[in-house]
Image (cartoon, grey):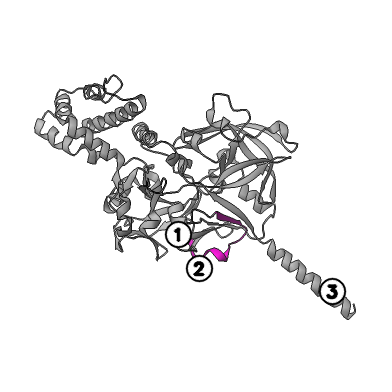
Amino acid sequence: PDLATNKMLKQLLCLALLIAAASAFVKVPLKKLPQTPRQALDASVRRSNAILSRSLDASLPVHNFEDAQYYVDISIGQPPQDFRVVPDTGSSNLWVPSSECKWTQISCDLHRRYDSKKSSSYVANGTDFEIQYGSGAAKGFLSQDEVTIAGLTVKNQMFAEVTNEPGLAFVAAKFDGIMGLAWESIAVDGVAPVWYNIVDQQLVSEPVFAFWLARNASQDGELVLGGTDSAHYEGNFTYLPLTNETYWEFAMDDFQIDGKTQGYCSDGCHAIADSGTSLLAGPADIVKEINAKIGATGVLSQECEQMVDQYADVIIDDIVNHTDAQTICDDIHMCTNSSSASNGETDGKNCAMCKMVITTLKTVLGNTKSRLLIEAVVKHACDLLPSPMGESSVNCSTVDSLPNVDIVLSGKTFTLTPNEYVLKVGAAGQEECLSGFIGLNLPPQLGKLWILGDVFMGAYYTVFDFANKQVGFAPALPKV
């Protein structure tokens, strides 16, 4: 070929390389909700839910969408039907509400619903689907269709049409469903996650994805598919090999407060990087200690103390006489037949709290008849209670004086400042400050497991390396 032809070929090659570089990864806007679904509920309803969840089942699932705060826009089918879904590294299935929801499902009416009859690319499946969350189970059936996210169209994606949605908090949710980004091994019905199909169909050049969670409330975050965005982090990544291929789980070395080790991981800890929760979760007994050390007070504990201060003598007399919890709570006007109850909602909350306090006391005391012992235990009754989930409050005026906490991973210290681990909920002037640490009761075989949600991932840009089975963290920009 002549010189002109060689020059043209070089220009075409450069153009092709530029195009390839430009399409190496896809940026997906991560839109931030002003409140999580649980925070959006009225405070008394949230507390009642926490009380009831503790009294009904002390062992909750690892993941709970009620604390999700970020969503992305996707579409399903041809022509496209639009949905807002939580990109969730703590689960593996894609699900959205179905047009076949019953009219009694109020949450369905408040969200967009997939209608298979309107999609020319729909393929029926019908396999039963059920996934458990802390607030209840999402139930429905499987279908197959095209799924599009930020211009990438995934062919033949299996997903769930949900006809029964999980819990009251979903009514308050501003997103429609969940898009799981964890490993296929924990996918319900063995369905291949969306990310697996993105990689298998070669829609991205590199099998990694990354999260930048904007700390500025006026900004969207960013999910990058197929790479990382250097504009949103500084320095090098610290990579942690996965300890198994279920969640994005890795070893955690230590948890420190004000630079001092607390001994929580002396026997070993593991952690999960979870984009689907706004909080940082750990073993319930340990988180109770952490909240005490940062000056956070359980809302339930405050209400319990008021009840015990007012009715201690009646409670002690009834326990001495081996009266059951329901009768004791009736006697002190905390349950339904109370003439002093102001309304059903308040009464229901107080009754649930009362019965849990009395049941806890009776469990601790057993068959003792010693009034002195009963009096001593009743005085400390509220210290026996588990902190309700996410309901430990901090005095907003003291936030700047709280200690830093450090999470040590692969020998490197990752610091969280008080402004990073305290959540401010509500409008200016009426803000409530909540501890970002939440207690989680898990089966003993899971060991000391921590969930590093948005509290951590907001401070540290997080990359999920699918090919090398590792998670990486680097300081996020801009800093708070």
Judged from the image, the secondary structure of the residue bearing numbered disc 3 is: helix
Residue 251 within the segment the image draws in magenta = no
Instruction: Say which residue label 2 marks.
Output: 234
> What segment carries the magenta color?
220-240
C-alpha separation, residue under disc 3 versus residue under disc 2: 39 Å
Judged from the image, the secondary structure of the residue bearing numbered disc 1 is: loop
Determine crowd level at label 1: few under 14, some 14-19, many 20+ residues with C-alpha closer than 10 A: many
**Residue 233, percent from left and from top:** 52, 65
Instruction: Say which residue label 3 marks.
Output: 8
Q: Residue at x 63, y 45 (%)?
A: 74
C-alpha separation, residue under disc 3 versus residue under disc 1: 47 Å
Q: Quadrant of residue 229?
A: bottom right
Mark toward the start of the polypeptide (3 vs 2) = 3
Judged from the image, the secondary structure of the residue bearing numbered disc 2 is: loop
**Residue 31, percent from left and from top:** 55, 50
- For residue 328, above or below residue 202: above
Give, as a three-letter code, the residue at label 2: Glu
Q: Quadrant of residue 338?
A: top left
Q: Give the residue at the far front of this rendering.
A: 429
The quadrant in which the C terminus is found is bottom left
In the shown orientation, is residue 312 left or right of residue 106?
left
Q: Is residue 203 visible?
A: yes
Instruction: Say which residue label 1 marks.
Output: 459
